Amino acid sequence: MDRSATSATAMKEPSMKDHKRLLLIDDDPNLILLVKDYLEFRGYEVITAENGREALDILEQDIPDMIICDVMMPEMDGYTFVEQVRQTERTAWIPVLFLSAKGQSADRVKGLNKGADVYMVKPFEPEELVAQVESSLKQTIRWKEHQAKGGDNGSRIQVPFDVQLTPTELKVVQFVARGLANREIAEELNVSQRTVESHVSNMLGKTNLHNRTELARWAIENQMA
């Protein structure tokens, strides 16, 4: 990434980027410096960490609007980190963008199945990174607006306060909230459709909800999707 070239074309825009805080995780100090500099020039606040373990410590104190994370890192890699993020209710909603030198289809699928929302391959164009960040943040805003409206009938879905989903159930409910059918979810997770149906049934039992529509609304309202 050419810092001088990008700085010459980058312009601050007083839009949704203002006051948006990003957590950038990478063990390459040069990439951290360049990406941080570029994103800050574009109007974002950027917090940095060298690996997933350090990032989890940061999340204990501060919740960013989005996470940009390398995959291969010491101490704790991106896969393990994002699984931890998705298992915790207060962080499960945060959009995650993976940066990786591995660009094979299987690598992309693995990254997305682990819980990333976006998978970008290094080297990348800075403008594409910003576009992906903006797209993910806009999607989060849409979810929050939907949550504020209370779904279709203006009232929030009520479930027992102590409901705990397994990591796999969380992945399934995220796909349900995105409108995927059980067959499509099975293909995404590389499991049988019967397995997906079992997970959906278990979640309906845990939440005392009646159908997939209510399950999807609950996931969106609680920022799990």
Image: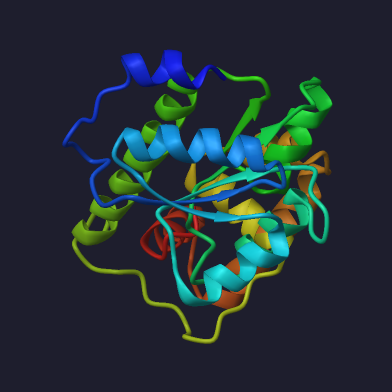
Identify which residue, 142 or 95, lies in the foreground: 95
54 versus 34 height, above or below? below
Residue at the front extreme?
Answer: 4
Residue at 63% across, 45% down:
69
98 versus 78 height, above or below? above
Q: Is residue 98 visible?
A: no
| Number of callouts | 0
User: In the displayed structure, does residue 149 sit left or right of residue 33?
Assistant: left
75 versus 98 height, above or below? below
The N terminus appears in which quarter of the rendering?
A: top right
Residue at 68% across, 24% down:
122
Q: In the rendering, at what x and y percent does residue 44 appear?
A: 34, 44
Q: Quadrant of residue 18?
A: top left
Residue at 48% across, 66% down:
210
- What colour scheme governs how the chains and residues are painted in the rendered image of this protein? rainbow
Q: In the rendering, at what x and y percent does residue 223 appear?
A: 42, 60
Q: Quadrant of residue 170?
A: bottom right
Residue at 23% across, 30% down:
12
202 versus 216 height, above or below? below
Q: In the rendering, at what x and y percent does residue 160 appear?
A: 48, 84
Q: In the rendering, at what x and y percent does residue 68 appear?
A: 56, 44
Identify which residue, 124 or 162, lies in the foreground: 124
Q: Is residue 71 visible?
A: yes
